[in-house]
Amino acid sequence: MQPVMDKAALEEFLAREFPQVTGDFSVEDVAPMQVRVRMPVAERHLRPGGTVSGPSMFALADVGIYLAVLAMIGPKALAVTTNCSIDFMRKPAAGRDMLCEARLLKLGRVLAVGDALLFSEGMEGAVARAGLTYSIPPR
Amino acid sequence: MQPVMDKAALEEFLAREFPQVTGDFSVEDVAPMQVRVRMPVAERHLRPGGTVSGPSMFALADVGIYLAVLAMIGPKALAVTTNCSIDFMRKPAAGRDMLCEARLLKLGRVLAVGDALLFSEGMEGAVARAGLTYSIPPR
Amino acid sequence: MQPVMDKAALEEFLAREFPQVTGDFSVEDVAPMQVRVRMPVAERHLRPGGTVSGPSMFALADVGIYLAVLAMIGPKALAVTTNCSIDFMRKPAAGRDMLCEARLLKLGRVLAVGDALLFSEGMEGAVARAGLTYSIPPR
Amino acid sequence: MQPVMDKAALEEFLAREFPQVTGDFSVEDVAPMQVRVRMPVAERHLRPGGTVSGPSMFALADVGIYLAVLAMIGPKALAVTTNCSIDFMRKPAAGRDMLCEARLLKLGRVLAVGDALLFSEGMEGAVARAGLTYSIPPR
């Protein structure tokens, strides 16, 4: 199954529907059942010591799986996160963008399940790992 | 075991160590192994339709358990979240503050485990539920 | 909302539908949105050192929430677990039954969410904590 | 970093230390930071309808990550599961063995984090996905 939205369509959708997060995320790549999303790290994402905050990483994983779902089913569906389990494994590098590799493991009629690996750009070893479930409302 | 930090001490600690979140959280109550934290919901927490964003709820659960740990062990420890599993169960009420009831189920030498229930003020039924693990570095 | 199945009805249902687990679980108490279930610990649940195995504890949490759902919606629904996040916090006491306090936090039309605390009988402090989601098929 | 235990060493360790699960699992492959484990599905793993039980799948994911840890650090360490978050995504095929692809994402001094994908042999699409954390006691 091929994606029905490409990078430009996903970014336009984000900008229109979620103006609050404008500039927070850019779509790097879209493939069947997976997307790669970049989060340019800014002052507001940081914690003392220059580390990226947990909520910022949660937001990145969440948007990654969300966009992976939309890429496959199109912009009309209002999917909502029902569960996220996230492991924080390494301290992110200071002053580096974060990248999210999101892939869907299941895209059902009512539930989608995916996982996300988060990286500090240029650093080996994932900073965090998350599994998310989205509920897909009936058309 | 009694808490070693009270409301004022926890809020002062937050303001000093996490100036980025000033005004985001206030401590309502501190008891042995538990705290109640309020998040005054502002424009920046919202999503289309007036609902509170997932990352904002994650942040509230995270700070709730963090403060519950600090209340018991004092401000010197640098605890970090290692895992969070969160279930989003109901749509938060628009224009209402959120409250977090955080309690510790285990406070070990190296790991603390707690759970958090999040409520929209005045609404029955928890909006979200989270379990979190914190790693406590050796003194 | 009151339960529609009592202890006897739940145990009869388990014995009829899940003969593989006969004798593994007994229902101690049923109340609105919650049940208490006992797992008499036997040789097959143990690991070296007399500790109860992780899969046995998972099974107890899973059956606890399952029975809490059935108690409320009746025996006709075929609910299936879609997610479980479990924290193992303390070593269970050797030679003691385990008890599960299961409660539902949400009982929706398609999803039920609950949490479970597991105890070694007579020991203070929960041995494990789990959050579970069940998918409830349409009638 | 290369594994310090191979298939034979891991299976011998399981047989010696966990005689209760003899015959439940066989090691198919060992590579740096990952293992593949087979669970020959037997009557005791089944639920009505021929589906594999949740606790059996939990057990497979748990042993997969456990063996991935031991393969890297050797048989002397007593690692214990501290957290598992598992998503059940598809009904396993009846009468088919299950396979677990386990990989470590972090192998630290005190915590190891890994994820596991579970498959019904011959069926496309993972049946379940799990993330697990193991605590590694000091030597």
Image (cartoon, coloured by chain):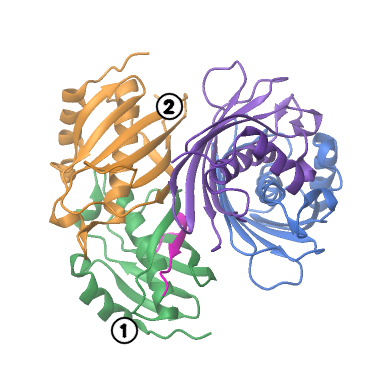
Chain colours: A purple, B blue, C green, D orange
Residue at which label 1 appears? C9
x, y percentage for residue C25? 28, 69
Q: Is residue B59 above or below residue D76?
A: below
Indicate the secondary structure of the residue bearing disc 1: helix
The chain identifier of the residue carrying mark 1 reads: C
Q: Amino acid at mark 2?
A: Pro
Depth check, front residue: B54 or B21: B54
Residue A116 visible, this angle: yes
Magenta-span inclusion, residue A86 = no
The chain identifier of the residue carrying mark 2 reads: D
Query: Which residue is rendered at x = 39% and y = 76% of the image?
Result: C70
| Quarter containing the C terminus of chain D | top left
Quarter assignment of residue B123: bottom right
Mark number for residue A10? none
Query: Which residue is rendered at x = 73% and y = 47% of the image?
Result: B4
Q: Amino acid at mark 1?
A: Ala
Q: Do marks 1 and 2 share a subunit?
A: no
Query: Which residue is rendered at x = 41% and y = 48% of the image?
Result: D86
x, y percentage for residue D119? 29, 42
Tell me the distance, in whole angstroms, between the alpha carbons under discs 1 and 2: 48 Å
| Quarter containing the N terminus of chain D | top left
Mark number for residue D138? 2
* Mark 2 Cα shell of 10 Å, populated few (<14), some (14-19), many (≥20): few
Q: Nearer the viewer, mark 1 or mark 2?
A: 1
